Every structure is written in C-alpha cells, then in structure tokens.
Image: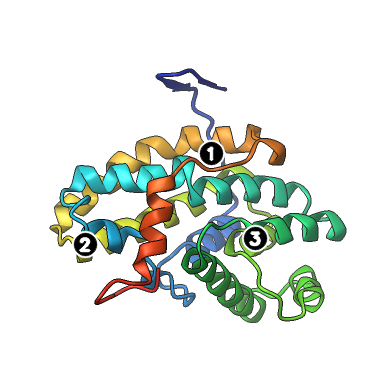
C-alpha cells in the first residue's frame, strides 16, 4: 500500500517472486547489452549538463528522479501496467500502444522511445519468439511503437509479473541516464553507484503508484526537462541523440 501526501510517500514492501525463466528474461530485456541503442540517448540530460544545471551526483539524482517520478519514465510505468493488463485483448492493447506512441513532448524523446521500441520488438521476436509479438508486428505495419508498450506485451506473454516488469523497466531507465551522466559531467564511477543507490530507494514506491494510476489521471510535470529536450536539437556539439 502507498499513501501520497503533499510532502511524503510511505510504502509497505511487497516481495515478488519470479520463476527462473521469467527472471532471466527480465534481466536480459533490461540489460544494457540488449542491442536497442539505449546508450545513445540522454533524455535531455546532455543539455542540462551543458547548461551547468547537473554537475554533481546529487543533481544527477534529482534529474533522474524527475524523469521516473513525474516525466517520461513515470508515463512508461503507468502505460506498462495498463498495457500488461490488456495484453490478451488485441484491440484494447493496441489502443494503449497508440497512446504510448504519442505520449512524448519532444521529437527527440519520441525518437528515443520509438527507435528503442522497434529494436526491442525485432530482437525479442528473433530470440524469444511468441505468436502475440508476431501478430502485433503485423498489426503495427511499420507504424512507430513505444518501447514501453512492446516491453509490456512481451513481459505479459512470457509470464513476467507486472510489478517486477515495471520495476525492471524503471531501473533500466534510471541506470541508462546515470550512465549518461557519469560520462557527460563527468563523474567518477563511485558517484555513479551512489546515484544508483539513491534512485533505487525511490523505485518501489513509484511502481506501486503506477499500478494504481488510471490512464485518465496520467500526465507529466517536468517542464524544465521538456525544455532541455527541445534545446538539445540546437546544441553546438552532441554526444547523444536526445
């Protein structure tokens, strides 16, 4: 159970047990070694570093926390919860997938989601085949699809628990941004792990909240992050694609 007030979030701990095959899949699909290009995106972080707004590991934590608690990461968490619940109803799932594809504020963060979604679908269909993924790819017919939606479909049909799936996806999102921050600022590896530990304390409560949130209540509250993403297109030099 999670209770949100104006100042605090309190949470009780729920332990989710996965079968060994499901755990293997979750680890594989959230690993940086999965070839979907996640390391090439910074979700606007490169602009924030260039502007001097992220220079220490604690500021990196604040940035990543904003993404997963109020920004694109939060949107993905809620959409995964709803998409997994609808995964066995193609029409209902496709409606959520279409919403997920449109739920980005800038062209670069849309590219980030769509290209990783396309790559994820391609890789998983080849390495972990399932008729539901093939059917979705046929219905999709080369239209863009959000990474979160494809991940949700694969997780649901391969027996991964929704709580674990959302937790893994948020951890992967945070880990990718922290890795980008370590390279951009730059920060030491120990500071990167301090940031990872700090963010890890937040994810459990966010997973529970995401499962309680309806699509009607879904939204973001990260205008600064969106502006960083908009202005990333005009940076003089760029290491990342978003």
How far apart in space, not on screen, are marks 2 and 1 (Cα)?
31 Å
Say the numbered circle drawn on residue 102.
3
Specify the quadrant that holds the C terminus: bottom left
Read off the residue under disc 1.
207
Q: Badge 1, how many Cα within 10 Å: few under 14, some, many 20+?
A: many
Disc nearer the start of the sequence (3/1): 3
Residue at mark 3 to residue at mark 2: CA–CA distance: 28 Å
User: Residue 202, percent across and down?
Assistant: 40, 36
Label 3: how many Cα within 10 Å (few below 14, some 14–19, many 20+): some
Which residue is labeled 2 in the image? 50
Quarter of the view holding residue 97: bottom right
- Tag 2, which secondary structure? helix
Using the rendered image of the protein, determine whether residue 90 is visible from the camera's viewpoint: yes
Residue at 48% from the left image edge and 61% from the top image edge = 30
Q: Which mark is residue 76?
A: none
Are dots 3 and 1 in contact, CB under 8 Å?
A: no
Q: Position of residue 162 (x, y in %)?
A: 63, 46
Q: How many marks?
A: 3
Q: Is residue 172 above or below residue 114?
A: above
Vertical placement of residue 161 versus 188, above or below: above
Which of pointers 2 and 1 indicates the residue nearer the eye? 2
The residue at 61%/64% (across/down) is 146
Mark 3 residue element = helix
Residue 240: give x, y in percent of width and height.
34, 73
């Amino acid at each position: 159970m999670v209770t949100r007030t104006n100042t605090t979030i309190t949470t009780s701990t729920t332990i989710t047990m996965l079968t060994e095959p499901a755990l293997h899949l979750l680890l594989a699909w959230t690993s940086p070694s999965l070839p979907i290009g996640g390391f090439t995106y910074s979700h606007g972080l490169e602009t924030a570093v260039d502007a001097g707004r992220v220079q220490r590991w604690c500021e990196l934590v604040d940035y990543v926390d904003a993404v997963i608690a109020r920004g694109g990461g939060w949107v993905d968490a809620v959409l995964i919860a709803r998409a997994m619940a609808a995964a066995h109803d193609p029409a209902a799932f496709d409606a959520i997938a279409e919403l997920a594809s449109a739920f980005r504020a800038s062209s670069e963060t849309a590219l980030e989601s769509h290209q990783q979604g396309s790559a994820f679908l391609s890789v998983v269909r080849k390495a972990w085949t399932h008729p539901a993924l093939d059917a979705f790819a046929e219905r999709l017919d080369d239209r863009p699809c959000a990474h979160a939606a494809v991940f949700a479909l694969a997780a649901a049909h391969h027996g991964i628990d929704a709580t674990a799936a959302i937790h893994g996806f948020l951890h992967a999102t945070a880990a990718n941004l922290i890795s980008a921050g370590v390279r951009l600022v730059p920060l030491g590896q120990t500071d990167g792990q301090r940031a990872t530990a700090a963010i890890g304390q937040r994810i459990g409560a966010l997973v529970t909240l995401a499962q309680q949130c309806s699509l009607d209540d879904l939204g973001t509250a990260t205008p600064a992050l969106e502006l960083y993403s908009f202005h990333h297109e005009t940076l003089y030099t760029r290491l990342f694609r978003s």
